[in-house]
């Protein structure tokens, strides 16, 4: 089968995750330690799919309050007012700064959502033992890992604004509860991306999974 | 068994993956996230108070998501939608009330739009300039929950502040407006909260609010008066200008106090009603707790008698004229002038109170009951002959007033006690008696035989005419007969005088010549006498010795 690719695991080898030395595992169940760097060898990360699923689920749960709760509380003599992320996007768009609105929309709404969907897709495709477009899926995974660290833009803007706008008697800005959930989404998706083992993409069959343990 | 001895044919032990369903510890993270998120959600839902609708006449300054509902300057809700009502005549404002304030939303809660108000009496709602308008709220006392309200047009009375509300009945509003200050001894102690026309439209009811420490000075004896403007009185002491404050001059104001002659009284209950007097003097001098109305039927013209004209008792004002009109008398089928007067007998009390205490006490005792007052009235009218009369207050304007005085010669009358108001007997007034005298004079003049006198005068004039005609004829004869003769005589006389003039006084007249000579002789004689006198002066001895001869 053309799509059935050669993998180290299938050939009876194990790759060290730290120094990437290919070695013979001591045992299928207990691969032992890397003879070069001493790292604990694992044919595949243990419970990778389960952990990733848990983190993705947690991130998805946090994504809802992150968008519903205000991320910024503005206090003026008129009273206190909370701004959600989408509220800010709408405000920026209606006030004419559509590039800014687009930026915020992409950085704060679409990227976290895209990450969640991407991870879920990877997980499902691995669980279904799909063998299609493994290369694209690996690229997608790399993109998810890469973009993770840039998703804190919103949190960064929020902190910045809170620090800058403290005109105490007239106006003050405080972070809202939403920003905590937003940060949680970002951190959880990053952790989920880390816990996902991209080697699983290439394993692609249930028999393999069974064989590899 | 060969099979049993061959070690290669021994079955391979299988590594069974544990079928026990293990839950990775990592699932705690999503569970934790879910718990926190659901917890926040539940808290939000629990904090979400009731949604209410308020109907406004207009949505001036009300914005969805921006306008707050404030109670005691605390946000208790936020407007979530501003829509028109179904019939497009009003504005339907939907507001989300906070959970902690849900208990305040009862049936008689009040909503209104707070707007900045800058007036001469002060600035209010200044916060709205910065924050925009907000919806004011006042809690109700009801326990019945409600969700639909109609907003007030104006802020309600300030009942959150400690103090009391009183109601004043005034004939007119004057220059008093809402927010006008109320003064007690020139201290600003409250303000006018509202005013409205009475149901019958004949008076104004002003609602005032007196702040807490001062409301105890409003007692049952308190008099309110209009302190607007400036009062200038000029008298023997010069000009006296009185005003409560500059603000009251500009925006009007009310003041209250207890008249000095009255006891302090008990603090008045909230919503107690008072009369509003037009000025301080009226308020401080017009105790009218007991008012009694009487009707008077006059038999003379009421021209000059105005409503409000004073009613005097022995010259002191004790009441006023309330109504002037005609009454139809069915017995005689005619009209008779009817005057309704109000007696304020307490004025007499105050004037008596300084005097004899025992007498005052008796009088007060009589005045305390209607029967006592009636007894006093009977004594005055039926025994002493108290009568009402119309008197001229001012000859210049012809204003009349009603004066009550004793008329000992008046015919006895009995008061009809069944009537209400009681009718008091009247006597002809000063003007009326004057008229009567004039009338009698005119009657006498009328009785004179003016016709006969006229005829006689006519005869006399006729004979006088005849005499004059005869005189005229005589003069004509004199003219004709005597005047030519006279002219001739005069001419002769003239001639004689001219002759005499010529013969006596002419230059060549002999008489003149003689006179000239005589005068010359006389001059000479005078000269000789002068010489002689001179000589004597120098030679007085010559009188004795004779004239000395000039010796050579």
Image (cartoon, coloured by chain):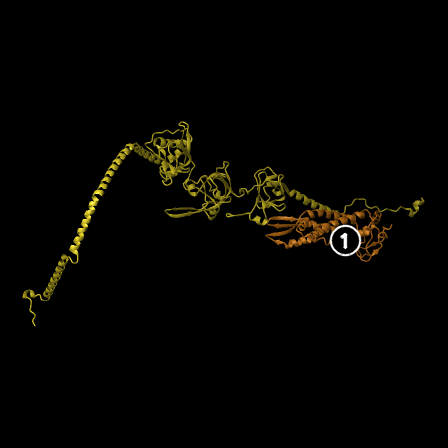
Chain colours: A orange, B yellow
Give the percent coordinates (x, y) of residue B125. Answer: 55, 47
Residue count near mark 1 (Cα–Cα under 10 Å), binned few <14, some 14–19, many ≥20: some
Is residue B516 visible from the viewing direction of this image?
yes
Q: Is residue A49 visible?
A: no
Q: Label 1, secondary structure: give it.
A: helix
Residue found at the far bottom of this picture: B552
Q: Residue B203 location, x and y as percent? A: 48, 38
Which residue of the protein is positioned furthest toward the right in this rendering? Answer: B2
Name the residue nearer the viewer: B231 or A33: B231
Q: Which residue is mark 1?
A: A143
Q: Is residue B45 left or right of residue B171?
A: right
Q: Position of residue A178 (x, y in %)?
A: 68, 49
Give left or right: position of B188 versus B54: left
Chain on which label 1 sits: A
- Say which of B428 and B73 sits in front: B428
> What residue is at 63 percent from the left and 48 percent from the top?
A81
């Amino acid at each position: 089968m053309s799509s059935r690719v050669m993998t180290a695991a299938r050939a009876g080898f194990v790759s060290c995750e730290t120094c990437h030395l290919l070695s013979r595992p001591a045992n299928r169940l207990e691969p032992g330690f890397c003879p070069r760097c001493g790292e604990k060898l694992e044919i595949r990360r243990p419970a990778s799919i389960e952990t990733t699923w848990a983190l993705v689920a947690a991130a998805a749960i946090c994504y809802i309050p992150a968008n519903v709760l205000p991320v910024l509380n503005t206090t003026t003599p008129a009273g206190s007012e909370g701004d959600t992320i989408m509220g800010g996007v709408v405000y920026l768009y209606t006030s004419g700064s559509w590039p800014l609105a687009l930026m915020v929309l992409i950085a704060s709404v679409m990227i976290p959502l895209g990450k969640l969907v991407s991870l879920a897709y990877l997980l499902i495709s691995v669980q279904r033992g799909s063998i299609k477009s493994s290369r694209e899926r690996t690229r997608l995974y790399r993109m998810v890992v890469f973009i993770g660290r840039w998703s804190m833009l919103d949190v960064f803007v929020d902190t910045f604004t809170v620090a800058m706008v403290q005109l105490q008697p007239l106006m003050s800005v405080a972070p809202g509860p939403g920003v905590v959930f937003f940060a949680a989404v970002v951190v959880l998706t990053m952790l989920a991306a880390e816990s996902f083992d991209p080697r699983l993409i290439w394993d692609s069959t249930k028999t393999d999974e069974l064989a590899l343990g | 068994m060969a099979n049993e001895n061959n070690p290669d044919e021994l079955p391979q032990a299988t590594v069974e993956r544990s079928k026990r369903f293990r839950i990775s510890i990592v699932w705690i993270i999503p569970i934790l996230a879910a718990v926190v998120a659901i917890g926040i959600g539940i808290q939000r839902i629990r904090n979400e108070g009731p949604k209410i609708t308020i109907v406004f006449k207009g949505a001036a300054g009300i914005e969805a998501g921006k306008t707050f509902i404030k109670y005691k300057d605390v946000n208790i809700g936020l407007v979530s939608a501003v829509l028109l009502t179904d019939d497009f005549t009003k504005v339907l404002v939907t507001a989300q009330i906070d959970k902690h304030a849900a208990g305040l939303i009862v049936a008689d809660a009040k909503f209104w739009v707070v707007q900045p108000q800058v007036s001469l009496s002060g600035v209010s709602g200044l916060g709205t300039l910065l924050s925009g308008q907000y919806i004011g709220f006042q809690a109700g006392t009801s326990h019945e929950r409600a969700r639909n309200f109609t907003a007030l047009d104006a802020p309600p009375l300030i009942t959150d502040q400690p103090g009391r509300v009183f109601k004043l009945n005034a004939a007119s509003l004057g220059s008093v407006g809402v927010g006008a200050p109320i003064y007690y001894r020139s201290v600003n102690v409250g303000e006018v909260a509202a005013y409205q026309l009475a149901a019958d439209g004949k008076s104004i009811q002003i609602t005032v609010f007196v702040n807490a420490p001062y409301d105890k000075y409003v007692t049952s004896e308190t008099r309110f008066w209009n302190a607007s403007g400036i009062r200038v009185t000029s008298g023997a002491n010069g000009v006296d200008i009185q005003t409560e404050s500059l603000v009251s001059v500009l925006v009007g104001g009310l003041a209250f106090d207890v008249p000095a002659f009255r006891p302090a009284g008990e603090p008045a209950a909230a919503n107690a009603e008072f009369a509003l007097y037009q000025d301080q003097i009226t308020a401080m001098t017009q105790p009218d707790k007991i008012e009694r109305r009487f009707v008077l039927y006059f038999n003379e013209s009421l021209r000059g008698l105005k409503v409000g004209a004073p009613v005097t008792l022995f010259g002191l004002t004790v009441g006023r004229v309330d109504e002037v009109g005609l009454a139809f008398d069915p017995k005689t089928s005619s009209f008779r002038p009817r005057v309704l007067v109000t007696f304020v007998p307490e004025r007499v009390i105050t004037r008596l109170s300084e005097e004899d205490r025992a007498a005052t006490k008796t009088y007060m005792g009589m005045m305390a009951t209607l029967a006592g007052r009636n007894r006093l009235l009977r004594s005055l009218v039926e025994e002493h002959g108290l009568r009402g009369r119309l008197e001229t207050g001012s000859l210049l304007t012809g204003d009349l007033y009603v004066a009550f005085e004793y008329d000992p010669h008046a015919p006895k009358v009995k008061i009809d006690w069944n009537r209400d108001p009681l009718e008091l007997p009247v006597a002809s007034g000063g003007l009326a008696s004057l008229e009567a005298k004039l009338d009698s004079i005119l009657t006498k003049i009328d009785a004179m035989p003016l016709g006969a006198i006229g005829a006689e005068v006519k005869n006399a004039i006729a004979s006088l005419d005849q005499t004059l005609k005869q005189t005229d004829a005589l003069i004509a004869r004199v003219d004709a007969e005597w005047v030519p003769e006279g002219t001739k005589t005069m001419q002769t006389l003239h001639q004689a005088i001219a002759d005499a003039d010529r013969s006596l006084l002419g230059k060549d007249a002999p008489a003149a010549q003689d006179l000239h000579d005589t005068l010359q002789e006389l001059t000479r004689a005078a000269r000789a006498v002068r010489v002689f006198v001179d000589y004597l002066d120098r030679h007085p001895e010559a009188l004795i010795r004779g004239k000395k001869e000039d010796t050579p």
